Image (cartoon, grey):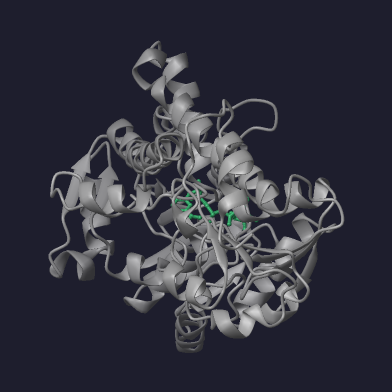
Amino acid sequence: MKLTVIGTGYVGAVHAACMAEIGHTVLGVDINPDRVDLLNRAKAPMHEPGLDELLTRTVASGRLRFTTSLAQAARFAGLHFICVGTPQQPDSPAADVRYVDAAVEGMAPDLRPGSLVVGKSTVPVGTAARLAARLRQVAPQAEIAWNPEFLREGSAVRDTLWPERLVVGVSSARAEAVLRDVYAPMLRGGVPFFCTDPSTAELVKVAANSFLATKISFINAMAEVCDAAGADVTTLAQAIGEDSRIGHPFLQPGLGFGGSCFPKDIRAFAARAEELGAGKAVAFLHEVDEINTRQRRRTVDLARALVGGSFADRNVGVLGAAFKPDSDDVRDSPALAVADAVRAEGAEVRVHDPAALDNAQAAFPELKYTSVVPEACDGADLVLHLTPWREYAEIDPALLARVVRRPLLVDARNTLDVQAWQQAGWCVRALGRPGLNGAHRHATGTGPYDGLIGVSLESDPCM
Ligand code: NAI
């Protein structure tokens, strides 16, 4: 089949390459000419495992190319996937759908009769219906469907070629048939295919993200209780995760979620539900958001307590800038939020990341950056582990101990082998684990770390 992909960011570039990989002839479109140029040279515009190889193969095959022209795209094929961004509005929690609207408006005058325009962007429920009404005015023979995207950055190619499920929201049997056809190789592999109405399809996406975000904030709320009670949240998470009704995924306590999806999607969902008169039903999402944001402050508080109550004149080495491992995406990165907060309080901060340094530098130019872990930690009074890249789990803590000034570590992701670090002489702290290094918090203070600062650290073997 011939198809186009409008918007070639994290979702669109992968979708375009994967559609070409399974045999379709694909024209990708982006308003960013630099991105189009890179993609036409088979270079991935972002760090995404496997994408460079896929682009090299599919661009060379002649089945994939890119343009900046929406009109050309509209004429190229009868099937169009919209993958443009839907960020949070600058002054409201709602989603900014102007890029989706602009893509549809831009193509409308040139759409072939019978075209199917399929949204993949995450949008407020009702967007497909609104766009369908608009198309009835400007391109009456075109049709809208919604096919939300569930890929995860870091495993986007695999998630697209071998999805866990496909969800399509359509208004006609013809649209369903077209989408079954385009995804035929996946369907032959037995992937569950949910064909529903566009509103349900739109809601499936935000409901899934809301559930996952809630799971993360739930375990982080438990971490706060563990801090208050002198208990250990990692053991708690493992124990409750063994319950097959709960499960382990997304039950990793730590710094919380960030990135370009969960934070803005739960806010936009709550705002849209409010508009629909169903705000109360998802009011808990405000608490999920608040718990999540609080983990960033709690991490800074814990770090400050460790270096003696002030960051002034302290050197801090930061491990991780991307919002998650295997990605160079720094949008709403918890790691950079913490690093910058520590810098703003007077610390000299050096950040390491295996892939996201360019994006981090552009977003937070006042931080210092290095691509070498020991350089980030050279002379550090404190090391903050903020993004759980696999390579940080492979650090030799004894070697790193030689370059720092003081072997103090906050494992804000709870993914390092704490015992190995302790055996190498490090004092390790983590949210929800007040008993690390035998420093038990006594329930005497009123603030989250009063006991930790005032009582425990004095008797801490690492102090
Ligand atoms: P992105 O910001 O990386 O890419 C969007 C691209 O669209 C940019 O390259 C931009 O230049 C282009 N664009 C904007 N307006 C355009 C127009 N009128 N015509 C052509 N191109 C245009 O966004 P990302 O991360 O790929 O997300 C896209 C959508 O998918 C969003 O709604 C997001 O919520 C959703 N999503 C994102 C996932 C992720 O992991 N990044 C996962 C699942 C869904």
Which residue is found at the position 40% from the left and 23% from the top? 284
Q: Nearer the viewer, residue 356 or 344?
A: 344
Q: Nearer the viewer, residue 84 or 389?
A: 389
Q: Is residue 297 visible?
A: no
Q: Quadrant of the C terminus?
A: bottom right
Q: Quadrant of the N terminus?
A: bottom left
Q: Position of residue 462 (x, y in %)?
A: 59, 63
Q: Position of residue 379 (x, y in %)?
A: 78, 73
Which residue is found at the position 66% from the left and 52% from the top? 306
- Furthest toward the front, the residue is 459
* Position of 115 relative to 102 (above/below): below
* Position of 318 relative to 91 (above/below): below
317 left or right of 124 in image: right
Q: Nearer the viewer, residue 357 or 46?
A: 357
184 left or right of 317 in image: left
The quarter of the picture where residue 447 lies is top right
Which residue is found at the position 61% from the left and 46% from the top? 302
Q: Position of residue 52 (x, y in %)?
A: 52, 82
* Position of 248 relative to 387 (above/below): above
The quarter of the picture where residue 403 lies is bottom right
